[in-house]
Amino acid sequence: MWFLRSCGGFCPGKARSLSRVSSLMQVFRQTLNPTTGRAEWTAMDEDYDYNQEVARSSYTDMLHDEERNKKYKAGLELAIGRVRGRGQRVHVLDIGTGSGLLSMLAVQAGADRVTACECFKPMAGAARKIVKTNGFSDKITVIPKRSTEITTGPGGDMSERANILVAELLDTELIGEGCLYTYQHALKHLVTPDCIFVPHAATVYAQVVESDFMWNWHRLRELPLKGCEKGLVPSSDMEACMGAAAVHDIQLSQVKQEQFKPLSEPIKVFRFEFDKKMECLERGTDLSVVIKETGQAQVILMWWDIEMDPDSSVLLSVAPFWAHPTPNNMQWRDHWMQALYFNHQSIPVEKGQQVALHGRHDEYSLWFQVQKQGSMNSTGSEVSLERPVCRCGGHMVWSRPRLGMLNDRCRWGTYAAALRQVLAPGQTCVSVSDASWVPLMAARLGAQEVFALESSDLGARVTHKLIEANNLQDKVHIVQGSEEQLEAALKDKKVAMVIAEPYYSSSLLPWHSLYFWYVCTRLRHKLQGGAAVLPARAELVAVAMDFENLWRLRAPVGTVEGFDISVMDQMVKDHSNQTDERVEPHPLWEYPGVGVSNPVTLMNFDLTQSVPTENMVATGDIPFTRSGSCNAVALWMNYDLLGDGRHTMSTGPHAPYTSGSPQWDPHIRQGVYFMDQPVQVLPDSRLVYRVTFSPKDGQMDFQFDIENSQGKN
Ligand code: SAH
Ligand code: ZN
């Protein structure tokens, strides 16, 4: 729960955070230069201000999770009651104390003393302050260390072992934060043999489903081109690839019922009893599952529940609504979601048939495979039960939503229609995209030659595979690097067309794709007269939002279970005061909400002209169209491919949208500007904005204020 969303290594995946903390506790921050399209992870030095990590982490969301807090409290009360019942003094070890909440709950429930450890130093400092503010310094000792570094015995961090262990080290994938090893180490070194663990156990569930919608995130599909005998195809190794290993976390309850079909009941796959010794942190289980609907077994949905006490009387489930014990009373949370795992291949299954569901886990991750029973052959299993690794390269350059975008036939239909309008025989084109269909499509539709600029080596290799699979070697030439390499490759050729989706894997926020504009500007002298630039225009669009829940991520916590945790709020506030990086990327289709204004264009960009040298400033106001709580502004880009309004692509709402809930494009993250605090708005009030685009560094700066008819709010 500490990272926003998991992301294996540097991948353009679904990480919602702009920063991550490695296991070595060194902070890496991703910085992007939109004018060059380059992103890099920079290691921060000792003095680095960590407030950003705290501000953008899930700590706040966890503290807002009332069900979680109350169930930890109940679990602690039961455990403390038991230990007291044995006539023992209560010594609680809180591993990963964060804000100190669980330690304070333990003291409140009657613990004699608490040892709290926290490996993230800035958080340990915050915990100390919070414990002091709430008057618990005499009973709670905060140790700024990883639990595995704690020393025991006389003179050590802990003079004696603890008889209760409380910890919240679970993520969407349950074990992704390394709790298995942390628990095993604690069992050996830090707790008594009769120690009670809160939570005591966890169960992992899996459900096999058919879902074209989700399968599109896993497999690149053939792309038919209207009126063309040949469409575009993926390479054969892409079709055979196991895919990426990184967990795909998702707010499953937001997937529409028509977007998937359950093929099995939810099945218990693993149970972990945290207080039991494990010989080995890797395990596998092979289950026989009855198929209840005929279909294609494609995706395995996963979630878990935890038992807070050894009697399993307090249960906390993160199941989606259809499998939830209390579907009408579900806590909204973002720090624990559900997860998807993709079957190696889509396999046809029939109602009543029994299939094998294989579950595996290692120290940090889970994976699953569905296989027809009896399809094992003498050389072993038909499919690999190894942890999936991408061998085709595609699953490394393409995030899962990006694969969905490449499989979005509607999007590509628009693109192809626009391209046909401007393509003429004998043209030389330049494509500025990252491992995209764009250069191939231009070649297939008639361009004489296409120079495809690829920013990364991996992107170039993947594009190369696509070129070969489609027999376009003589038409599409890859240039890896920047415009200098491109110019060298073009020699004295003049360019008739520069094309882009535009989409770049390093882009974090919608306007980062304006990198295309910079490239066009730098290539200007290579363009022939009347050269086409596609897209020709872009616009930045905003809608004022009343999100049901998303706003909670950034709402102050104040008091939690009666404890004053405002120190955390101050850390977040200090951060926002220091930086104007107010906008965060979020996949909005996963977050219900309604627009309280119409979508309004804030700024127009003419991509056929050069990037200006002076700042672009836009001011104005957006009238609210309905009453509600305005808690955020959603931001995205629209592209007008030919500049005539006839071929447009949006990275915001899919369908034209005027009121109610926008149908957000599920393949890209939109930008979200969180208001300082939710404000009740009426149709006679307005959102006043000032947007500044700074061409020098490609940054966009926003200022939004709500003005009620009585004046500023
Ligand atoms: N206990 C808090 C915070 C939970 S977040 C709460 O429930 O609100 C988990 C925290 O554990 C993070 O702050 C992370 O830095 C810390 N952590 C993870 N593994 C740890 C370990 N082995 N030792 C110490 N801290 C750890
Ligand atoms: Zn692959």
Image: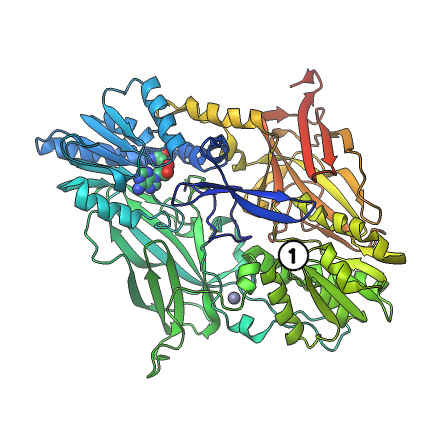
Relative image position of residue 20 (x, y in whole percent): 47, 43
Relative image position of residue 131 (x, y in whole percent): 32, 22
Vertical arrangement, residue 501 with respect to residue 609, above or below? below
Relative image position of residue 621 (x, y in whole percent): 75, 28
Q: What residue is pinned by disc 1?
A: 455
Q: Quadrant of the N terminus?
A: top left
Horizontal placement of 238 versus 326: left or right?
Answer: right
Residue at far right of view: 529
Its colouring scheme is rainbow
Residue at far left of view: 87
Horizontal placement of 207 versus 78: left or right?
Answer: right
Whether residue 454 is visible here, answered yes or no, is yes
Give the structural element (helix, strand or loop) at label 1.
loop
In the image, what residue occupies the spot 69% across and 21% down?
A: 707
Q: Quadrant of residue 558?
A: top left
Q: Nearer the viewer, residue 218 or 292?
A: 218
Q: Quadrant of residue 463?
A: bottom right
Q: Amino acid at mark 1?
A: Ser
Whether residue 222 is visible here, answered yes or no, is no
Whether label 1 lies within 8 Å of ligand 2 gets the answer no
Quadrant field for ligand 1: top left
